[in-house]
Amino acid sequence: MAGTLCDQPSRECLNGGVVVIKDVERPLSAQTVVKEAQCKCPAGISGLECEVCNRKCKNDGILDTNMCVCHCPRGRGGLLCGVCTLEANDCQNGGTYDKETCKCTCKDAKHKGVDCSIPVCYNGLKVGKRYSYE
């Protein structure tokens, strides 16, 4: 219990959870209504203290289970990587922006990637990498 007269229950919530004090009815106790601290967890998190991460990253985002956050690929953002952050001026090498897919359509086969920034040789080898032929 916490508070000036120990009348407020205390609880620690993890992962951005918020403590909520609720009146809970206890019919078999001397006090029929008692205050109880509960954790209100953000979306994608559960458990009594918000300790369980249930988030599912979208669009090839990678979940960091220790921090319960999604690491989003280029062009994506938001809590679960569901927000397109790519804009028309992000497209490189003559690529054109496609708002529906949140990608750039590359002008030719010489470039690839979400923003057409990755150079590709005609034979499929990467530009700038050394190859040995025997």
Image (cartoon, rainbow, N blue to C red):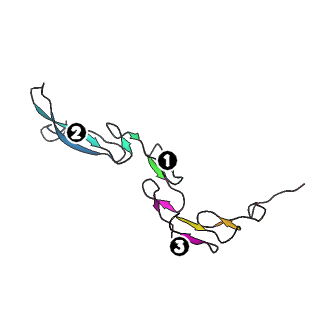
Which quarter of the picture shows residue 123? bottom right
Question: In the shown orientation, is residue 66 left or right of residue 18?
Answer: right
Considering the numbered disc 1 on the image, is that residue within a helix, a strand or a loop? strand
Identify residue for label 2. 37
Amino acid under disc 3: Ala
The residue pinned by badge 3 equals: 88
Tags 3 and 2 in contact by the CB under 8 Å rule?
Answer: no
Residue 17 percent coordinates (x, y): 32, 45
Q: Which residues are magenta?
A: 71-98
Characterize the magenta stretch by its predominant secondary structure: loop
Residue 72 at what x, y percent from top left? 50, 55
Residues at marks 1 and 3, CA–CA distance in whole angstroms? 28 Å
Q: Marks 2 and 1, Cα distance to the nearest angstrom?
A: 29 Å
Q: Residue at x 32, y 38 (%)?
A: 49
Measured as percent of width and height from the top left, residue 116 is found at: 63, 67
2 or 1: mark nearer the eye: 1
The crowd level at tag 1 (other Cα within 10 Å; few <14, some 14-19, many 20+) is: some
**In-image side of 64 versus 30 (left or right):** right
Q: For residue 91, say whether it is visible.
A: no
The mark closer to the camera, 1 or 3, is: 3
Query: Does residue 76 show up magenta in the picture?
Result: yes
For residue 97, what is the image quadrant?
bottom right
**As rendered, which of 4 and 118 lies closer to the eye?**
118
- Return the residue at label 1: 63
Say whether disc 1 or disc 3 marks the residue closer to the N-terminus.
1
Q: Residue at x 49, y 46 (%)?
A: 64
> What separation in Å lies between label 3 and label 2 (alpha carbons)?
48 Å
Up the image or down, 12 lies above or below 128; here it is above
Does residue 35 sit above or below 132 in this rendering? above
